[in-house]
């Protein structure tokens, strides 16, 4: 039976056997003698004692009631004894011996009693799980890792679970080398979180800093809108606030690396006497250098300030005299200075706006590359697109940014050469851009001759007809998980445009009548006619429902050439019609080279095209001799949704221009 006492060791109450306390006391006294002549001896001893207290705490957490002789001896073995570091040769030998004994302990630990599975921290690539399995089954760790990589889809989740659940082999040896996550405040920019993450994952600190910074670019993206060419969702990052919250949480929960032991564990280095001494002395040396540098800077600034005061004092008299004689000119000088400050501010804002705008435009053009297949022909047009993107769009962006950086850094070498090179490249870009517009313009040169095609209804004598789109079995909404501007949705290699217009007119019979007019453009009239005839668009009647396709299919073979559909519904007097929200207007997509709308459009119009009835979505109407009337007797113009009315008006005007 041994006597147990409680001691206050580095702010911790530690229950320890009296004999173990004697061993600890002798060890600490030997450390004081060994480091008596070392610089920063008090800090070194204090950090060593803090490390010992931390190891005692880990032992007690495992269920031990007190610290025993064996526990103290193992702690001393992990820290090292002073005599082991007296000579450089003996230090190396002792370190090798310590590593061998540590490896032997780790290898024999699982063999005592029942074999247990551990994560091998000393032979890990990621979490040590594969190396642990290799040790457990007595096979090469490379085999386990290859099997894990081949079956990554199956073993990923189990690997993560085992990483968390399995104990580390380092926990079986007191004071074993391990890596912990701390905040590195010595190399901090804000709180040292990113620098600490860099130490933990073995990468440069700028990598985690970039990962936290990149999401904030989304704030710039979200403020730019270009009509139908808004930035796609896959370009706009949406986790900017999340990055800030994660950083703040890590700031709050991660401890700061204060002691030498903390700094060593943060870097994954062994915590022993020699490393603690080197860390403390390195910190002291760094502090001394910073203090000397600060003192030198203060001294230089003081001398410089004294010289400036002396020089300004000598020049003060004539300046005061000049100001007294020419007070008005002095006031004018103040205004000139203020004007210069304001001018520089305006120039800075303009330059910043130019850079942001150019970058935004370049990003928009780059983000539109996925739709190139559906708009641009292979061959010369594809080459012109890439030339335009590189030389016409990105060259000025890079050139302006380079010029600003060179001006800020006051770099003037080879300035004229670089300016000439960027100008020449941009001129080449203009050639690509103009050539691309000319080539595309030819593809939209002619329009087809519109022909109204009658849609056969299964029951044209119903009392009511309701228009809605087909169920979205192959359509994926743009706002759900992918946005391919300017098209509405896609399915495998097909994209869809919602270029659908609905006209409502009065029927001359007692039956509903529906017609579809397909419109398209091409390099020749025959090509436009052929393209319009190949437009796939289905209308199906199911009792009182008239189901319409949600969009017009565009494929890599059937390039987009302003394909559109005009649906005309003739409603008999006394019968009702309702158009759902998903039908009609939509996001109209059209490429126009400014040719107008009347060349070659010999549309044989009849009286039915001379103005058609206005309507609103999700409102039930009845046809009267005077036109459409709302069933609820409300006035469309009195509705508070003025934006929808204005949208309808623009849609109607555009359609009237197209059919002329």
Image (tube, grey):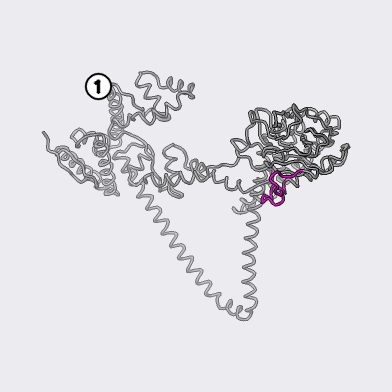
| Residue 136 appears left or right of 603 | left
- Horizontal and vertical percent for residue 348? 63, 57
Q: Is residue 404 above or below residue 322?
A: above
**Residue under the image location 46 percent in, 38 percent down:** 203
**Residue under the image location 45 percent in, 59 percent down:** 297
| Residue 218 appears left or right of 108 | right
Count of numbered badges drawn on the protein: 1
**Residue under the image location 22 percent in, 34 percent down:** 64
Of 551 and 9, the residue lying toward us? 551
Of 381 and 458, the residue lying toward us? 458
Asked whether 56 falls inside the magenta stretch, the response is: no
Of 121 and 6, the residue lying toward us? 6
Give the residue pinned by disc 1: 113
* Residue extent of the magenta highlight: 628-647
Of 146 and 96, the residue lying toward us? 146
Question: Does the rendering let one see residue 432?
Answer: no
- Horizontal and vertical percent for residue 264? 35, 40
Question: Does the rendering let one see residue 104?
Answer: yes
- Horizontal and vertical percent for residue 486? 69, 38
Say which quadrant the C terminus sits in. Answer: top right
| Residue 239 appears left or right of 501 | left
Say which quadrant the N terminus sits in. Answer: top left
| Residue 187 appears left or right of 380 | left
Q: Is residue 88 above or below residue 458?
A: below
Q: Residue furthest left?
A: 1
**Quarter of the view holding residue 517:** top right
**Quarter of the view holding residue 113:** top left
Asked whether 638 falls inside the magenta stretch, the response is: yes
Q: Residues within 10 Å of mark 1 (few under 14, many from 20)?
A: few
Q: Is residue 189 above or below residue 457?
A: below
């Amino acid at each position: 039976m041994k006597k147990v006492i409680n001691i206050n060791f580095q702010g911790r109450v530690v229950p320890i056997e009296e004999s173990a306390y004697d061993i600890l006391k002798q060890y600490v006294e030997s450390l004081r003698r060994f480091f008596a002549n070392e610089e920063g001896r008090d800090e070194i001893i204090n950090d060593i004692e803090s490390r010992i207290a931390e190891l005692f705490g880990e032992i007690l957490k495992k269920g031990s009631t007190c610290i025993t002789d064996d526990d103290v001896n193992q702690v001393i073995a992990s820290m090292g004894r002073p005599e082991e570091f007296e000579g450089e040769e003996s230090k190396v030998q002792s370190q090798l011996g310590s590593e061998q004994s540590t490896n032997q302990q780790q290898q024999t630990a699982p063999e005592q009693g029942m074999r247990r599975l551990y994560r091998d921290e000393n032979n890990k690539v990621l979490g040590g799980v594969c190396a642990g399995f290799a040790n457990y089954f007595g096979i090469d760790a490379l085999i386990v890792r290859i099997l894990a990589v081949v079956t990554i889809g199956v073993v990923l989740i189990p690997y993560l679970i085992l990483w968390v659940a399995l104990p580390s082999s380092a926990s079986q040896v007191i004071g074993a080398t391990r890596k912990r996550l701390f905040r590195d405040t010595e190399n901090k920019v804000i709180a040292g979180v990113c620098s600490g993450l860099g130490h933990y994952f073995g990468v440069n600190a700028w990598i985690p800093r970039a990962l936290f910074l990149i999401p904030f670019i989304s704030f710039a993206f979200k403020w730019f809108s270009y009509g139908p060419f808004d930035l796609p969702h896959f370009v706009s990052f949406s986790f900017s606030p999340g990055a800030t919250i994660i950083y703040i949480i890590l700031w709050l929960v991660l401890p700061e690396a204060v002691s030498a032991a903390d700094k060593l564990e943060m870097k994954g280095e062994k915590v022993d006497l020699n490393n603690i001494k080197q860390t403390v002395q390195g910190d002291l040396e760094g502090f001394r250098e910073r203090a000397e540098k600060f003192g030198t800077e203060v001294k230089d600034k003081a001398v410089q300030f004294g010289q400036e005061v002396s020089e300004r004092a000598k020049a003060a008299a004539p300046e005061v005299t000049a100001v007294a004689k020419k007070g008005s000119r002095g006031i004018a000088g103040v205004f000139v200075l203020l004007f210069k400050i304001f001018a520089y501010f305006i120039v800075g804002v303009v330059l910043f706006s130019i850079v942001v705008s150019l970058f935004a435009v370049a990003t928009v053009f780059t983000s539109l590359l996925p739709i190139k297949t559906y708009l641009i022909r292979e061959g010369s047009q594809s080459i012109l697109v890439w030339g335009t993107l590189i030389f016409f769009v990105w060259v000025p962006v890079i050139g302006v940014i380079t010029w600003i950086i060179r001006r800020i850094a006051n770099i003037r070498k080879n300035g004229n050469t670089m300016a000439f090179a960027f100008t020449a490249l941009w001129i080449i870009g203009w050639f690509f851009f103009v050539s691309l517009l000319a080539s595309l313009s030819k593809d939209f040169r002619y329009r087809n001759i519109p022909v109204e095609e009658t849609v056969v209804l299964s029951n044209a004598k119903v009392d009511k007809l309701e228009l809605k789109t087909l169920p979205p079995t192959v359509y994926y909404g743009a706002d759900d998980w992918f946005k391919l501007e300017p098209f509405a949705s896609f399915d495998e290699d097909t994209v869809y445009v919602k270029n659908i217009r609905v006209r409502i007119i009065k029927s001359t019979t007692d039956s509903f009548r529906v017609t579809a007019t397909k419109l398209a453009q091409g390099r020749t009239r025959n090509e436009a006619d052929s393209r319009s005839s190949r437009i796939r668009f289905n209308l199906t009647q199911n009792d009182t429902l008239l189901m319409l396709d949600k969009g017009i299919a565009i494929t890599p073979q059937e390039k987009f050439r302003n394909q559109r559909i005009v649906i005309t519904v003739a409603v008999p007097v006394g019968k009702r019609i309702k158009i759902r929200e998903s039908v009609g207007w939509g996001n109209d997509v059209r490429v126009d080279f400014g040719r107008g709308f009347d060349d070659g459009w010999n549309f044989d119009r009849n009286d039915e095209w001379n103005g058609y009835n206005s309507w609103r979505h999700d409102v039930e109407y009845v046809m009267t001799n005077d036109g459409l009337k709302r069933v609820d007797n409300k006035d469309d113009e009195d509705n508070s949704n003025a934006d929808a009315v204005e949208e309808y008006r623009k849609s109607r005007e555009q359609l009237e221009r197209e059919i002329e």
